Amino acid sequence: MFEVKEGNIFDVKVRSLAFGGYGIARVEGQVCFIPGVIPGEIVKIKVKSIKKNHFNAIALELIEASPDRVEPVCPWASKPTGDGRIKPSVCPGCSYQHINYPAELKIKQQQFVELFTHTGGLEDVNFLEPLASPRELGYRNKITLHTELDEGVMRLGYFMNDNHDVLEISSCPLASAAINKLLAEASAQNGFRHSLHKHMTVTFRETAHDGALFWRNNPPSRMSWLKEETPAGTISVPAESFFQINPDCGAVLINTTAAMLEQLKPDTVIDLYCGTGVFGCVAAQHGVKNIFGIDNDGPAIAAAEFNLKKHGAGNFELLAGKAGKLFSSLKGRYAPETTTLIVDPPRTGIEKPALQHLCATDIKDVIYISCGPDTLCRDLAIMLRNGYRIVSTQLVDMFPRTAHFESITLLTRDNE
């Protein structure tokens, strides 16, 4: 077998993009991963490192460009230079700024399907058409910047590819216009720079109601709850608690969940990882009689209680703590055949105890909202082995220009 060595240079054709944004090519049958390229392109590459089952390379020169290639908006994104060479990305946030958005959405859908079939071993899945973000730029309502003291100069920006050094930024094309304006105004003030210290975080956040604001490290202890406008009404959110960073696609998830609940018509909804209770509010507005919410974030649970009362929920109970333990504590308090579980976990997926308890119950329907398609496929494979089947799944592009995306999957089981 031909031996690839570090420093070798080859011309290759990019076959596809893996989940995460790396181009895939082959050299003498060996798999190669290359950042900053597009399927169909021919590039000159240099081998950077050799791994057990593949090797990593950097693109030296763009020999034949894809018609889907565009000029990135961000100056730190990967782009060809005037002499045909490819400048690598400095900021790891955006993997797809060099690709037009329709092509990005198509690529993400292909990755989504491949993760189901190759990673999860899931076949005959009903994939619905992907839902694009109404805005591919300027959609983020929150960014978190980091500080680094470099030879007496305080940098403020994103971590670079090494996840250590800080890239100074004056604006971010993914952030809302209001956040970029506030960042520019704050950075222009001498007092702001003097208030920063090494290894600090500075969070910029915006809502339509509150405008743009920022805090250093943690929000002020007496800071009022923020207010987010959603299809379920105004939702109060503690500043430190989770809320979708793309309000437009957050609204898509809410409306899609509402349509599913309207179809399923459950008597009870268990909202696992409920956060500030937005899906509980949706359930109440669609006639669900009994609502349980579970989340490990105490301030979010307090806000959820306020939101559910405000939006007309009658019989509801909220529990703060670990999902697995508290979920199992509800056993015997609901009728499984008329219950729908809504689960919206972090990127790591459903906690193992919670997933084990779910598989041991007879809960009929599950709405699984995921920001981690790899862990979603892992969890779905386990659920399918325990009596569930997938009704449909749909990609929601919550994070345009980045390697990430959201999805919503409906599962059911035919209880005897």
Image (cartoon, grey):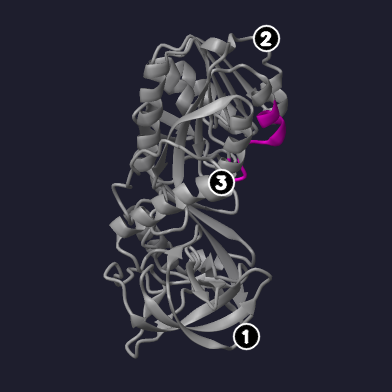
At which x and y percent is residue 71?
Answer: 30, 72
Can you tell which of label 1 and label 3 is closer to the viewer? 1
Q: What is the three-letter code of the residue carrying label 1?
A: Glu
Boundaries of the magenta span: 346-356
Whichever of callouts 1 and 3 sits on the residue coming sooner in the sequence is: 1
Q: Residue at x 34, y 91 (%)?
A: 83
Viewer-proximal residue among 220 and 228 = 228
Instruction: Say the numbered circle drawn on residue 219.
Output: 3
Q: Residue at x 52, y 36 (%)?
A: 238
**Marks 3 and 2: in contact by CB < 8 Å?**
no
Give the tally of numbered discs.
Answer: 3
Q: Secondary structure at mark 2?
A: loop
Residue 279 location, x and y as percent? 46, 26
Residue 372 in view: no
Viewer-proximal residue, 155 or 230? 230
Identify the residue under disc 1. 6
Q: Position of residue 346 (x, y in %)?
A: 58, 42
Quick one: label 2 or label 1, which is nearer the N terminus?
1
Which residue type does callout 2 highlight? Gly
